[in-house]
Amino acid sequence: MQRTPCEYMIWNRIPAIRKELAEALIKQFGLSQREAAEKLGLPPAAICQYLSKKRGKTDIFDDTIIEEITISAQRIMQNNGSTVIVETCRICQIVQKKQTIPTDIR
Protein backbone atom coordinates (compact mmCIF):
# COMPACT_ATOMS: atom_id res chain seq x y z
CA MET A 1 0.00 0.00 0.00
CA GLN A 2 1.28 3.43 -0.92
CA ARG A 3 1.85 5.97 1.86
CA THR A 4 0.35 9.43 1.58
CA PRO A 5 2.53 12.55 1.74
CA CYS A 6 1.01 13.32 5.15
CA GLU A 7 2.08 9.92 6.48
CA TYR A 8 5.58 10.59 5.21
CA MET A 9 5.60 13.95 6.99
CA ILE A 10 4.39 12.42 10.26
CA TRP A 11 6.91 9.58 10.27
CA ASN A 12 9.94 11.34 8.80
CA ARG A 13 9.86 15.11 8.51
CA ILE A 14 8.12 16.14 11.75
CA PRO A 15 10.58 14.17 13.91
CA ALA A 16 13.43 15.78 11.93
CA ILE A 17 11.90 19.23 12.50
CA ARG A 18 11.53 18.53 16.23
CA LYS A 19 15.13 17.29 16.37
CA GLU A 20 16.39 20.49 14.74
CA LEU A 21 14.25 22.64 17.05
CA ALA A 22 15.59 20.81 20.11
CA GLU A 23 19.18 21.21 18.90
CA ALA A 24 18.62 24.93 18.26
CA LEU A 25 17.14 25.49 21.71
CA ILE A 26 20.04 23.68 23.36
CA LYS A 27 22.94 24.99 21.25
CA GLN A 28 21.80 28.54 20.50
CA PHE A 29 19.91 29.34 23.69
CA GLY A 30 21.81 27.22 26.19
CA LEU A 31 18.82 25.26 27.42
CA SER A 32 19.23 21.91 29.11
CA GLN A 33 17.55 18.87 27.56
CA ARG A 34 14.84 19.10 30.22
CA GLU A 35 14.22 22.79 29.52
CA ALA A 36 14.07 22.16 25.77
CA ALA A 37 11.59 19.35 26.38
CA GLU A 38 9.40 21.69 28.44
CA LYS A 39 9.50 24.38 25.74
CA LEU A 40 8.58 21.87 23.02
CA GLY A 41 5.96 20.06 25.10
CA LEU A 42 7.82 16.76 24.77
CA PRO A 43 9.11 14.27 27.31
CA PRO A 44 12.82 14.64 28.16
CA ALA A 45 13.39 11.11 26.82
CA ALA A 46 12.27 12.27 23.36
CA ILE A 47 14.87 15.05 23.39
CA CYS A 48 17.53 12.55 24.43
CA GLN A 49 16.53 10.30 21.53
CA TYR A 50 16.60 13.20 19.07
CA LEU A 51 20.10 14.18 20.18
CA SER A 52 21.40 10.61 20.05
CA LYS A 53 19.83 10.16 16.59
CA LYS A 54 17.57 7.33 17.73
CA ARG A 55 14.58 9.44 16.70
CA GLY A 56 14.33 12.01 13.92
CA LYS A 57 16.99 10.24 11.87
CA THR A 58 16.14 12.07 8.64
CA ASP A 59 18.45 15.06 8.30
CA ILE A 60 17.41 18.40 6.90
CA PHE A 61 19.98 19.65 4.42
CA ASP A 62 18.13 22.65 3.01
CA ASP A 63 19.68 25.88 4.32
CA THR A 64 16.43 27.81 3.95
CA ILE A 65 14.57 25.32 6.13
CA ILE A 66 17.37 25.34 8.72
CA GLU A 67 17.16 29.15 8.82
CA GLU A 68 13.39 28.96 9.30
CA ILE A 69 13.84 26.44 12.12
CA THR A 70 16.23 28.89 13.80
CA ILE A 71 13.60 31.61 13.50
CA SER A 72 11.03 29.22 14.96
CA ALA A 73 13.32 28.43 17.89
CA GLN A 74 13.66 32.17 18.59
CA ARG A 75 9.89 32.59 18.50
CA ILE A 76 9.40 29.63 20.83
CA MET A 77 11.89 31.15 23.28
CA GLN A 78 10.23 34.57 23.11
CA ASN A 79 6.72 33.20 23.58
CA ASN A 80 7.60 30.75 26.34
CA GLY A 81 6.81 27.72 24.21
CA SER A 82 3.28 28.79 23.35
CA THR A 83 3.95 28.81 19.61
CA VAL A 84 5.36 25.30 19.19
CA ILE A 85 2.40 23.95 17.21
CA VAL A 86 2.17 27.04 15.03
CA GLU A 87 5.90 26.98 14.29
CA THR A 88 6.01 23.24 13.63
CA CYS A 89 3.13 23.58 11.17
CA ARG A 90 4.81 26.58 9.54
CA ILE A 91 8.02 24.62 8.95
CA CYS A 92 6.04 21.62 7.71
CA GLN A 93 4.30 23.82 5.14
CA ILE A 94 7.62 25.22 3.97
CA VAL A 95 8.96 21.69 3.51
CA GLN A 96 5.87 20.73 1.52
CA LYS A 97 6.11 23.84 -0.68
CA LYS A 98 9.76 23.15 -1.42
CA GLN A 99 8.70 19.66 -2.48
CA THR A 100 11.33 17.97 -0.36
CA ILE A 101 9.04 14.96 -0.01
CA PRO A 102 10.06 12.01 -2.19
CA THR A 103 7.69 11.41 -5.06
CA ASP A 104 8.04 7.64 -4.80
CA ILE A 105 6.65 7.25 -1.27
CA ARG A 106 5.82 3.64 -0.54
Image (cartoon, grey):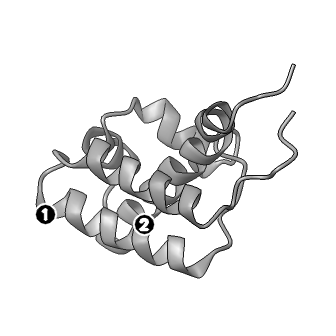
- Residue at (33%, 49%) from the top-left corner? 36
The N terminus lies in quadrant = top right
- Residue at (25%, 69%) from the top-left corner? 74
In depth, the one of 100 and 61 nearer the eye is 100
Q: Is residue 87 visible?
A: yes
Residue to which mark 2 is pinned: 69
Task: Examine the rendered structure and indicate whether residue 70 appears above or below residue 5.
Answer: below
Crowd rating for badge 1 (residues with CA inside 10 Å; few <14, some 14–19, many 20+): few
Q: CA distance from mark 1 to mark 2?
A: 14 Å
Left or right: 58, with 98 as reference point: right
Q: Position of residue 84 (x, y in %)?
A: 28, 46
The C terminus lies in quadrant = top right
User: Can you tell which mark lies on residue 105?
Assistant: none
Q: Position of residue 30 (x, y in %)?
A: 32, 67
Crowd rating for badge 2 (residues with CA inside 10 Å; few <14, some 14–19, many 20+): many
Q: Do the numbered discs 1 and 2 sit on residues whose CB atoms are within 8 Å?
A: no
Label 1 SS = helix
Task: Examine the rendered structure and indicate whether residue 84 appears above or below residue 45.
Answer: below
Residue to which mark 1 is pinned: 78
